[in-house]
Image (tube, rainbow, N blue to C red):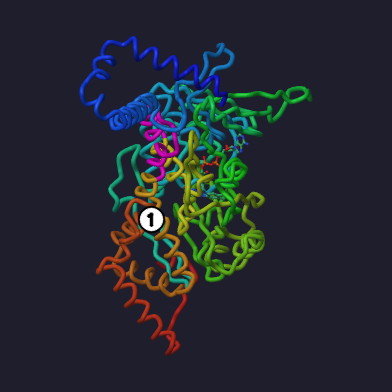
Amino acid sequence: MDSKYINNTVKFVTDALNKNTCVQKVLDTKFVKEHPNLAAGAAIGAGLLAASSIYKLSTSNTGKRYNYDAIPNLSFEEEIYDVATIGAGPSGSVLGYYLAREGRSVALLEKKKFPRDKFCGDAVATMAQDILRDMGVMKEIVDENLGHFAQNGGFVSPNGNSFIGNSAKELKRDAKYNRGAVIAIKRIVLDEKVAKAAKRMGAHLYENTTVENCTFDRQTGYWTIECVESESENGQQPKKLTYKARVLVCADGSPSSTARKLGYVNTEPNGICSRAYVKNNTTFRYDGVVFYPKSLLPGYCAIIREARDELNYLAYIIPGGKVKLDDLNHYHHEYMKSDPFISKALGPNPDIERMKAAPLRLGGIKKSYDDHLLIVGDAAGFIDPLTGEGIQYAMEGSKIAADALIEAFNERDLSGQSLKRYQDRWMNRFGHEFNMSMTMSLFLYRFPIVLDAAAKLINKRGSRFLAEWAAVMTGMKPKTWFLRPDVGPLIVLEAFGIAVERLFGRGQQQKSLDQN
Ligand SMILES: Cc1cc2nc3c(=O)[nH]c(=O)nc-3n(C[C@H](O)[C@H](O)[C@H](O)COP(=O)(O)OP(=O)(O)OC[C@H]3O[C@@H](n4cnc5c(N)ncnc54)[C@H](O)[C@@H]3O)c2cc1C
C-alpha cells in the first residue's frame, strides 16, 4: 500500500481523535500519561474486538455465505422464481404443489407434454395415496374410475410355494377413497393429474421444455437455467428459453442427468425394470402377485391388475444378484413362456404389448443438497432396493423437501448448511429403511429358501399375516418387523423344515396359483 496513503489516514484519525472531547478526556487521564504503551495496547485490542463485532453483526442478517438480499431489482420479464424443478414427474410436481400452497413461486420445467407415458408398475402405495388425497387427486382418480385398489394378492416363492389372500380387508383400509395398501394407476393418467394439481395451486408448468444447462452465480445467489423447446412447431428452429431461480431442484428421474452434470451423482442407475400391458386376459384372477424365479433373485416378476381389467406384467432386475441389466429382454420373455406360474397366469398367446423398459436408481444417494440446490425422487435414488417401488418415496421426499425449503426461505438462508435438514429428514423417514432393504435383498439372493419358508408360514398363519407382510413390503411398516420373535425365528424354523424335507427328497412343488 502507498506510504503517502497510510500517513494521510493516520493524520486523519489523529486529528479526529484530537477534536473529540471524550477521547481528549481519556488521553488526559493519569493512567494513560503514566503507562502510554499499556494504554495503546488496550486501545488496539478494544478496536479489534469492536471491528469483529461490527463484522459479525453486519453478516448475521444473511447468516451464511450468500447475501440473500443481494439480488438486484429486475424487470418483470426477468422474473426470478424461488424454485425451479427440472422435471414434472411425481417428485417435481408434488414439490411444486406444496411450495405453491405456501405462496412460493415455482417453475416446473418438463421436457415432455402431458399426457405422457412413463414405464412403471403403476402400483401406488400408501404414503403416496395420502399425498394424492391431500392434493385432491385421489378423489378424481376414484370418481373417474381410473385406478384399481388391490384386494387379493400374494406371492410365489422360488421353490413354488405360494399364498394368495385378501390383505386389503385385513388392513381395514376400506373407505371409498382408502381401500388397500396399493392402488394401480396408469402413469399416463397419474402424472398429468399430479402436475395439473400443482399448476392449479399456482406452480408455473412449462411443458415441452428440455433443460440443457444450469449455472449458479455465487454473487447474486441465483441459477440461470438454459432450456430448449423439446419439439418445435411446424419444423421451425426450436426456441431457446432461459429461466432464473434461487433454488434449483433436480427431479429429472433415475438417469439423474443434471445431478451427474453438476457432480453430485457419479454412478449409472443400478437396476432396470420392464413393463408390458396385457389386454383381454381371462386366466389371471388376482389383483397383484409377485413371482420370485430363483434365477432373477433378488429381482422378481409381478403381474398387477389395472383399472378396466388390464394387467401389467413386469420384470425387475435389482442389484446384488447374478443377473446383468442387459439380460432384461431375455428374462422378461423367457419367464412369460416357461415359468410355470407366470406363463399360466398370462395364458397362451397373451394380448401383450411390446416390452418397454426404464432404469432404476435404488437405495438413495449420499448427498442430496448443497447451496441453493436439492435432488429429489429417482434422481436422488429414492427407490426401495427390495421392492423397486419409488412413487411414494418420490412424493414423500418432495413433501419433506418443500417443508425444508419453506423453512429455509423464512430464515432467509438457502445455504447447504441450512438445506441439510432435507437430507436428515428423508434419511430418518425412509433412508435407513433403504439400507435395511439392501441388506435383505442380498440375504434373499444368498438364501432363497427364506422366501419358500415365508410362503409356507403365511399359508399356516393366514391372511392377517399376509397383510402384515404386505404392509412391510409396501413401506407401511418398518422392515425390522422381520426381526420380531413371532416372525424371524418362525421363518427360520420353516426354512429348517424345508431343508430337512429336501434332504429326504420329500420337497413338493406347486405348479398353479389356483391350488391355494
Ligand atoms: C418399469 C418400472 C416399473 C416401476 N414400478 C413401480 C411401481 O409399481 N411402483 C412404484 O412405486 N414405483 C415403481 N417404479 C419407480 C417409479 O417409476 C419412480 O420411482 C417414479 O417415477 C419417480 O418419480 P420422479 O418424479 O422422481 O421421476 P420420473 O417419474 O422419472 O420423472 C422425471 C421427469 O423429468 C423429466 N425430465 C428428464 N430430464 C429432463 C430435462 N432435461 N428437462 C426437463 N425435464 C426432464 C422427464 O420427462 C420426467 O417427466 C418403477 C420404475 C420402472 C422403470
Residue 59: x percent and y percent?
39, 27
Q: Amino acid at mark 1?
A: Glu
Indicate left or right for 360 with 468 as reference.
right
Tell me residue 380's x, y (percent).
50, 46
Residue 454 vs 83, above or below: the answer is below
Seen as rendered, the residue at the extreme front is: 34
Image position of 337 with respect to 65: above or below: below
Left or right: where does residue 145 sit relative to residue 78?
left
Q: Is residue 406 above or below residue 318?
A: above
Image quadrant in which you'd find residue 339: bottom right
Q: Residue furthest bottom?
A: 504
Q: Nearer the viewer, residue 179 or 230?
A: 230
The dominant secondary structure in magenta is helix
- Mark 1 highlights which residue? 433
Q: Which residues are magenta?
A: 402-423
The part of the image, by quadrant, that contains residue 27 is top left
Magenta region includes residue 421: yes
Q: Tell me, yes or no, whether the highlighted magenta stretch contains residue 501.
A: no
> Image point 47% across, 18% down: which residue?
9
Q: Quadrant of ligand 1?
A: top right
The secondary structure type at the circle numbered 1 is: helix
Asked whether the viewer can see residue 276, the reply is yes
Of residues 258 and 203, the one drawn nearer to the viewer in this rendering: 258
User: Residue 76: x percent and y percent?
Assistant: 55, 12
Q: Is residue 250 left or right of residue 484?
A: right
